[in-house]
Image (tube, rainbow, N blue to C red):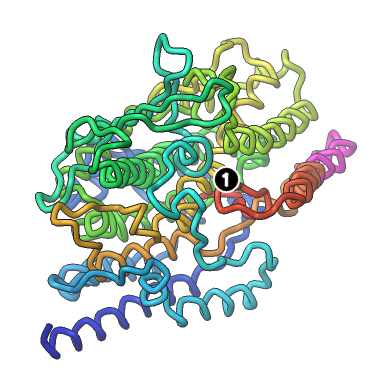
Amino acid sequence: MSLINSFQWMVRKGLWNGIATRKYRATVPKDVTTIAPMRAQVALIPLNEAYPAIPISGIRVAEQVPKDETQTSEESMMRLLAKACTFFSPMQAGRPEIAASPHQALDEAYSHRHRQTVLQQAAAVRLDSQRILRPPTMPVELQGVPDLGMLALRGPYAGYLRKVHGSSDGFEWDLEELGSYSHHSNLYAPWAHVLFKADPAHTSLRPIRVRCELGSIHPDDANWPLATRIAMCAATTHTALVRHWTWTHLIGGEYFSAATRNHLPPDHPLCRLLWPHMVGTHASNRLATLGQLMPDGDFEAIYSLTYSGLCQLIGKAGQDFNLRACDPEEDARHRGLLDSDLPMQTFANCRRIFRVIQAHAERYLRLYYTDEELRTDQSIRNWLAELERLLPNGLGLISTTLTCATLARVVARLIYLVSVQHEQLGTQLWNYQLWAHTHPVRVYRDGRRMPEDVYQRLVNSNYILNVVRVPLLQDYAPLALVESGRPDRHPRAEAAFARFRLDLARLQRKMERKPWAPWTLYPADLEANINA
Ligand SMILES: [Fe+2]
């Protein structure tokens, strides 16, 4: 390694780390309780018309960012950085592997400057000490050969488990579809199918076979550790590119916001309930698209797929979005897990939070509507029809009769999407992806560890995902509607918002009675929306 090469890397790393920490510092929680007058309609156009450099047409995005969300200087900066990636890229071919010790590798990439910036930002925005970004914690299931059985029950990959049809104790992860997209030839293809068997009492899961590019590999095969790493790579590739980015941001977030802006006037009670959970989405998605999805962006640099493979995956996977995945009980039933008796810790965690959100939505709606009144509200009918039309697989409701309870379920799914699901599939990866020795985002065929430029980009990308956003647990009272004809209702709406906050805080206190764990989703960590 020549001196010039090392010097170039030092400059490159210093510059791009500086850009990452600046982005972290520049992002402050936005006001989400002031509703803008929503006059301009949000028109949706194919993604490749909004961004000609990105060949994805099956997903639609806002043609223009609404005026109240516009971040002109930030967007100019992101366009400049997207260009900079091509002439002074954060990547430098030929860099050595990261250190064999995962903690040393992390310390070399997650610098003192990154950590100081977190503390400075926390002080600047007077962040609750519970919400400060902690240095990554290695989950016990990644300390050694990845414990796929545990990872299937708790943490960001718990949503992949499903029961094998016709079996009483067989379960699976099916990530074979990822094999359909082109990947870099020096990496193993990021696809896998994992077969699990439950013990007789259904207290744990044991992986008994991984099918991947290596063939059908069993726990006593010499290739088992490698096969489990390929399975982890497949799971995290799908989580980051499909579940987090495509489903939560591009499909769920973008369409939720467009339908709400286009069909619910600012003084509509439902708009008041939803506003904090969608405002800022179009602007934020635009900034993130420029940083991650453009050629030479984070996604292409970090994951195993080629740029065309990446774009094909996102374009195709968008059609598999299903809002039902944001309803823990319905989702578990669909995957054959509801009566499985398995210790599904993440499912129990998610269901508790979902129930708080759902109860809040129903209490609030019943302040304004009886079931009959709801059915005659044309704005709500238009909003629902638009979501049914836009979302692949629709709203996924079992009952088609509109009541406060069914509407509350839809609302809860949308709030859950941007708070709980976004935390689980995006920010929570902080405690998983940075342990590249057992949880690799790419697996090299020649057995080498990740090169330091790819790892540095992975660290900075995850760091930016963890910027400080608006907390879910906050005061929404300014959104309570003031109605001249119904002065009694305003304090009751304020009380409904206060009750939501109280219920989340109560759940937080209950959960704090147990030791903190990296896979747990805490109400105090959740954010009101997906935006930065
Ligand atoms: Fe995100």
Q: Is residue 388 magenta?
A: no
Type of the residue with mark 1: Ser
Q: Residue at x 37, y 47 (%)?
A: 240
- In the rendered view, tell whether residue 8 sits above or below residue 193: below
Residue 315's spot in the image, x, y percent? 25, 36
Rendering quarter of residue 369? top right
For the question of whether residue 477 can be seen, the reply is no
- In the rendered view, tell whether residue 133 sits above or below residue 322: below
Q: Residue at x 38, y 66 (%)?
A: 102
* Residue where numbered disc 1 is placed: 419
Q: Residue at x 51, y 35 (%)?
A: 153
> What range is drawn magenta here?
482-498
Left or right, 405 with reference to 135: right
Residue 236's spot in the image, x, y percent? 36, 46
- In the rendered view, tell whether residue 348 sits above or below residue 370: below
Rendering quarter of residue 267? top right
Along the viewing direction, whichever of 488 and 390 lies nearer the viewer? 390
